[in-house]
């Protein structure tokens, strides 16, 4: 793929600001910029060195558009591998559009979403997994997702896959060579070393595949449903967790008719809290719809926080037995979901009442959302459900579902190769499975691509990147 056009786009966020950056990339980027830029010192920017900065004016036919700083990055030592020019102008939305329209009139083309990074990939500046990490880095909104995106963009994941692919390719070459000498019945590939390599590849692939569970959590956050009967303090707890008045709080039961969602980052991990309608028998049509949505959200959540009124537990006979029955129903309906039992309004209890609740109900947590007591312990409990060991050890973590799918397919092919070797399958059939494994490795890094795949990946980028 060869790009003939010089593309232009706004590289900073749209809207007004202190400055805006307009980016050009292509063989004619320098000459096109020189056509609209007058250096304050009278220099010809087409003759200036790469990675230099120049003060001047964007002007055309006697009209001055803005005083700007112009940056020059000559290919191949640029982000895209082509000549790149960046114009830093004042952040007026009007000025931005005027300069972009001027460059379009002079022959530039408007960049498509992700086209700068696509050119970087095509020109060998990034492999495909690194290019995808650029989008993840832009979208990162917490420490963990930022750390994983940076690790991948620096090539940690790519390098691990590339090493495995290179070793497998060496053995594949020897197996293919054996096919050329099939009549002589010779073996060029040491089978013992080949078994060791296959076992090592299988171990690494399984580790990477397992890391996707953590990676998916880091990238998308953990949905947490806050459920319970009406008026037990679900909305108060949501407000306490977020440290703001996000949900309406009232003594009137059934105030929350719909779900309310918001996000909180705890120790670098994103949690998406969902405040749901109180679960109870009701003839109110609107409230019934809200309760139905509550069970839908429980089904979607990864963690369920079940809230009860601790004062009600202590003051009402048979309430603890009824609570245990309700907890049993939730566990039976959603057996695989972690369930945290929270006894709220602990500020109303005596020390003896608190002790009785802790004794009678297994793994219950006493808190007072109103007084913000025990909320930090709840955050620690939520964090315990995330295996952050790999993150803290700076191991490679897979966050991309396309990579996850390719890794699973590669593992299946490697297991076929291992089975073929142990079962005495002919070398030509083993070679087919090795080629397939190499194909899936290449899909990850972009050594195997097609226009549809690239279109799907880069369409998710912002324009200007």
Image (cartoon, rainbow, N blue to C red):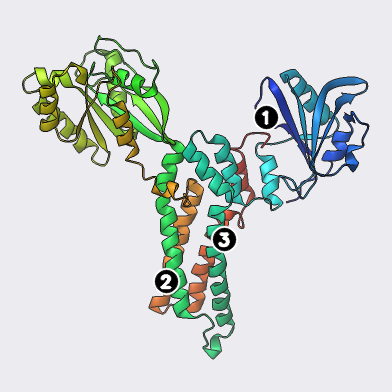
What residue did someone put label 1 on? 12
Viewer can see residue 444:
no
Q: Residue at x 42, y 27 (%)?
A: 263
Name the residue furthest bottom: 184
x and y percentages locating residue 222 in the rendered image: 38, 35
Q: Which mark is residue 137?
A: none
Viewer can see residue 41:
yes
Considering only vertical position in the picture, is 60 above or below 71?
above
Considering only vertical position in the picture, is 332 above or below 401?
above
Q: Give the Cα distance between marks 2 and 3.
A: 20 Å
Question: Mark 2 or mark 1: which is in front?
Answer: 1
What residue did someone put label 3 on? 162
Dot placed on the residue nearer the N-terminal end, 3 or 1? 1
What residue did someone put label 2 on? 418
Name the residue furthest front: 351
The quadrant in which residue 337 appears is top left
Relative side of 406 to 63, left or right: left
Q: Categorize mark 3 by other alpha carbons within 10 Å: few (<14), some (14-19), many (20+).
A: some
Q: Give the Cα distance between marks 3 and 1.
A: 33 Å
Q: Residue at x 39, y 30 (%)?
A: 272
x and y percentages locating residue 389 in the rendered image: 39, 48
Element marked by disc 1 = loop
Considering only vertical position in the picture, is 432 above or below 301?
below
User: Depth check: 398 or 384 in front?
Assistant: 384
């Amino acid at each position: 793929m060869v790009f003939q056009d010089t593309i232009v786009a706004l590289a900073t966020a749209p809207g007004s600001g202190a400055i805006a950056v307009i980016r050009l990339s292509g063989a004619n980027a320098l000459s096109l910029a020189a056509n609209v830029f007058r250096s304050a010192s009278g220099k010809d920017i087409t003759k200036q060195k790469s990675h230099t900065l120049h003060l001047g004016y964007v002007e055309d036919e006697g009209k001055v558009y803005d005083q700007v700083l112009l940056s020059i990055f000559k290919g191949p030592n640029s982000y895209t591998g082509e000549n790149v020019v960046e114009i830093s102008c004042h952040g007026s939305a009007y000025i931005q559009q005027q300069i972009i329209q001027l460059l379009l009139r002079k022959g530039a083309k408007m960049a498509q979403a992700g086209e700068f990074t696509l050119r970087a990939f095509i020109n060998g500046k990034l492999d495909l997994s690194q290019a995808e990490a650029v989008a993840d880095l832009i979208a990162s909104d917490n420490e963990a997702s930022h750390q994983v995106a940076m690790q991948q963009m620096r090539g940690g994941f790519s390098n691990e896959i590339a090493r495995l692919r290179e070793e497998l390719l060496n053995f594949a070459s020897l197996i293919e060579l054996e096919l050329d000498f099939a009549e002589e019945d010779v073996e060029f590939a040491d089978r013992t070393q080949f078994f060791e390599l296959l076992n090592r590849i299988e171990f690494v692939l399984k580790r990477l595949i397992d890391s996707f569970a953590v990676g998916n959590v880091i990238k998308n956050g953990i949905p947490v449903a806050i459920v319970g009967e009406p008026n037990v303090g679900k909305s108060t707890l949501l407000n306490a967790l977020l440290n703001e008045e996000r949900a309406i709080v009232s003594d009137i039961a059934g105030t929350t008719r719909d779900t309310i969602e918001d996000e909180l980052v705890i120790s670098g991990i994103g949690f998406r809290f969902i405040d749901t309608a109180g679960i109870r028998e009701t003839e109110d049509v609107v409230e019934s719809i809200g309760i139905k949505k509550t069970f839908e959200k429980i089904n979607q959540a990864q963690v369920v926080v079940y809230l009860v009124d601790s004062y009600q537990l202590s003051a009402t006979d048979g309430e603890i037995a009824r609570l245990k029955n309700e907890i049993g129903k939730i566990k039976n309906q959603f057996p695989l979901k972690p369930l945290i039992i929270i006894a709220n309004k602990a500020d109303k209890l005596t020390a003896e009442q608190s002790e009785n609740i802790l004794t009678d109900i297994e793994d219950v947590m006493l808190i007072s959302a109103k007084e913000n007591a025990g909320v930090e312990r709840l955050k620690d409990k939520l964090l315990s459900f995330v295996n952050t060991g790999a993150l803290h050890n700076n191991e490679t973590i897979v966050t991309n579902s396309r990579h996850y799918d390719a890794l699973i397919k590669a593992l299946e092919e490697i297991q076929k190769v291992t089975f073929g070797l142990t079962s005495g399958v002919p070398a030509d059939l083993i070679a087919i499975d090795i080629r397939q494994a190499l194909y899936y490795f290449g899909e990850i890094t972009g050594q195997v691509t097609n226009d549809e795949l690239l279109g799907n990946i880069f369409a998710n980028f912002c324009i200007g990147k």
